[in-house]
Amino acid sequence: MIALRIAPPRALTRPTRIVQRNMLVYRRSFMVIFSGFFEPLFYLFSMGFGVGALIGNVPLANGTSVPYAVFVAPALLASSAMNGAIYETSNNFFFKLKYAKLYDAIISTPMSLNDIARGEVMWALLRGSLYAIGFLVVIAVLGLAGLGLLTSPLGLLAFPAAMVVGFGFAGAGLAVTTFVRHWRDFDFVQLAIMPMFLFSGTFYPIDAYPPALQAIVQATPLYRGVHLIRALTTGTPDAVLLLDVAYLLTMGLIGLAITSRRLGKLLQS
Amino acid sequence: MPETTVPATQPLIHARALTKCFGSFTAVNGIDFDVAPGEAFGFLGPNGAGKTSTMRMIGTVSPVTSGELTVFGLDPAQHGARIRARLGVVPQADTLDSELSVLENLLIFGRYFDLSWAESRRRATELLEFVQLTERAGDKVEPLSGGMKRRLVIARSLINEPSLLLLDEPTTGLDPQARHLVWDRLYRLKQRGVTLCLTTHYMDEAEQLCDRLVVMDQARIVAEGSPRQLIDKYVTREVLELRFRRNDDETDDSAHLDGRLEGLAERIEQLPDRVLVYTADGEAAAATAYERGLRPASVLVRRSSLEDVFLRLTGRSLVD
């Protein structure tokens, strides 16, 4: 059969059905989604401007120094991309997988396990993108008010960069959740997320650590995300950005692959 | 992509030596069967007989351990998505989307089958009518009764206009009224030419719905035929049921039959609570038993059923 119409391949359209399903659910309660928008803003005002007033300027990797709010804002964007992705792919995904038995029904349709995994990542990214846009808009407005937090036109790339961070954590989040047996186990996820948020060069440069510890921090995904977005918003890009992007994309892709396999084990015995 | 069309003579489902193992446990042990287009085919058996495992293999959501299985002439391992596109599935547990409304459950399911929103809505509206749930379209799923949920699952399974419908214990747990409504809808589907493949442990359901069935026990098929054929082959036309009074020592009088039923019937089955006498003429057998001095507490003559077939084949009753 020769297809005369131009249709996007099913590998792309089928995952969007998961996104549409989730949109139907949130249609009635979309205010819930906005809750995640405020968290990074609160941090920006308390840490960036509040604590920042005490600190003054902070040196960047290339030696130039910037106001503390400029230093911390990109890290908060990266953290919020991580948190958004993790929230959606941990508790919400677990509920659908183990309690709502959502995927048990979906696997009886032409949808594949890959479609399910990709769809949930797409949804997590869509939700995360709302927060990223919101955060960037606030930064832009503050910029108009003379508080320039974006010091480089490269800062426009902060949005796709936040999506890359979200992709990495969404893929990994799904994969981890497929191994979770009980809600209690999510405490361990928090145990991994919280120190990353506090210690990944988010609130101060990692020069503060001894070299061995620095190496460990540099190996964490949030550090890569913070480094990536900070280099863009402060206009200090280097070749390491490519490493950041490769790291996060690989983490997301491996996460997706593990998720598909695990879903097969869990749903198709 | 060339569409594989199954000739009318070729079975929709074809299984030879079909086997499913979970570790060292064998759930399905080398079964053979074919389901023809338009047929209503049943798997009758107790819980744990391997019915659900068989259905899940046909539904391509459980890999075949060994043996041969084709659905629509296609291999489930190779063409899972293409098979599922033409299949309707009513699973044993209602896997409805509890976060969506009744109508939305159907709408999004249509989307999973690549239907447009408009087409999905058209079919959903029609199907809600078919299962008599139109008034509940906007309601959440949770407050629906068991029968309504089951009807909604059946409607959902029809959204892709399947040519083969798999039903795993479609009426288990429903009250008699709800069961009859489900049976009625399934009967209408059958009349429209939809092939039905169902599992049940209710003999009346098998008798009502199935043209042909296999009796499964302990992972194997132990008999095959139409309900009537099975009854004719394995049991007599009538069954005389004798119940005896319980004595103080927990034995009942049936323990002291002393062969007084000897020669009375083709076969006698002694159950914990009653004695079944398989005979062509139940009334005559009851009279003879009375003449021979037996004084049962109650006497019942009934037509034989698939339950009796199952008892005959396995020595156990279907529903414990």
Image (cartoon, helix red, strand yellow):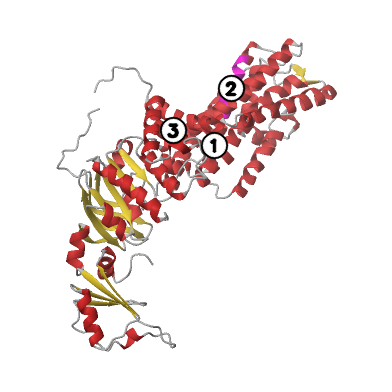
Q: Taking B102 as reference, is B200 left or right?
A: left
Residue A135 at what x, y percent from top left? 67, 21
Label 2 residue SS: helix
Residue under numbered circle 1: A172
Name the amino acid, label 1: Ala
Q: Mark 2 lies on which chain?
A: A
Q: Distance between the residues labelled 1 and 2?
A: 17 Å
Q: Which mark is residue A187?
A: none
Name the amino acid, label 3: Ile
Residue under numbered circle 2: A161
Q: Tell me the residue at 74%/27% (across/down).
A: A42
Q: Mark 3 lies on which chain?
A: B
What segment carries the magenta color? A156-167
Residue A211 at what x, y percent from top left? 70, 34
- Is residue A247 among what the camera can see? no
Residue under numbered circle 3: B108
- Is residue B163 among what the camera can see? yes
Badge 1, how many Cα within 10 Å: few under 14, some, many 20+?
Answer: many
Q: Tell me the residue at 38%/21% (across/down).
A: A8
Say if the magenta span includes residue A157. Answer: yes
Q: Taking B14 as reference, is A16 left or right?
A: right
Q: Residue furthest left?
A: B9
